[in-house]
Image: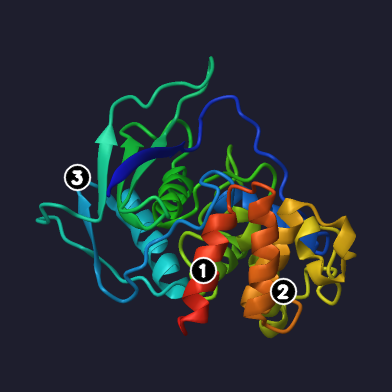
Amino acid sequence: MRFVIVLCVGFVLASITAMPAVAAGQIDMAALVTAFDQIVLREQGRVAKWTRGTVPLSLKLGASFGTAELNALQASLATITANTDLSIGRDDTAEHPDFLIEWSSDLGSPFAGAHNVGRTRSSFTVLEGELSGAHILILRDWNRGDAHRIDRTLPHEMLHAVGFHGHSESFDSVMTLGGVGYGTSRWDELFLRVLYDPRLPVGTPRIFALPVVCTLLRERLIAEGNIDVADLNRSGPHPYCRQLVDQPVNSLNSRDALRLAWAYLKGLGTARSIPEAEKWARLAAQNGDPDAAYVLQEIGSASRGNP
């Protein structure tokens, strides 16, 4: 099965004020997980990314790019390949490229005085979220009083193309609408590493992905010696960072029961237990939770010896 969805529209021009970046030393795990959710998960509701690993992906320029555009593209590709297992090579002769970048004369205006400068449309091979193609459109006259705007626009759209399906509301990220700085931020690079961590499988629904994301973010921040996140040694106030197994059983609704099933299935905050995972997933199914069937399928796979 293959389907196409329009993911997003890129940065807008004219009289738009950029949202403030989070100052160094002020960020905490709650803000970090919230930003990851906004940028990566919320739009699709699940982990949606490429799964071909080191198998080269082809990129075709269906437009004549100048030095500024080529430099911005090269920087974007370098960031992606340095922080994921993806290998992307340019092939302008490809008949069916994985990534296609073209010019557009008009991408529309979201409101008076603003102009969209980029748009990405991605294809998926299955409903679970495996990416199979991306078509990027860049406004031909993107340079409207800002000779470096392409250094925001191309990285923004390339990150959409590899799995960043949303936008930040206020964060130091190239995915913030209106723009924060030029090029990708170190947080964008961290989010790429987490998104393409093998412990975050493609297709994982958002409610199950967020506890894993919280764990992976903290793990990487500690390993990389990051000093700008204030609460690395505690769970933080974000609801998806708490240890679900500490909740009283009688307080669990079907959503929490399903999160608890996922915690037991993946060993998040507790010892891994397939029987316990199945018990809580079946309780959620009895209560009509729409995602219970997915979890029971994963439990069945794990009980047969699959990771």
The residue labelled by disc 2 is 218
Residue 154 in the figure: left or right of residue 177: left
Disc 1 from disc 3: Cα separation = 46 Å
Give the vertical position of 62 relative to 75 (above or below): above
1 vs 3, front mark: 1
The residue labelled by disc 1 is 298
The earlier-in-sequence mark between 1 and 2 is 2
Question: Whole-percent x and y of residue 281?
Answer: 65, 62
Identify the amino acid type marked 1.
Answer: Glu
Residue 170 appearing in the image? yes
The answer to which quarter of the image holds residue 218 is bottom right
Residue 2 in the figure: left or right of residue 22: left
SS assignment at label 2: helix
Query: Between 220 and 183, which is closer to the camera in this rendering?
Result: 220
The circle drawn on residue 64 is 3
1 vs 2, front mark: 1
Disc 3 from disc 2: Cα separation = 42 Å
Q: Which residue is drawn at 39% across and 35% down?
A: 142
SS assignment at label 3: loop
Question: Whole-percent x and y of residue 27?
Answer: 79, 60
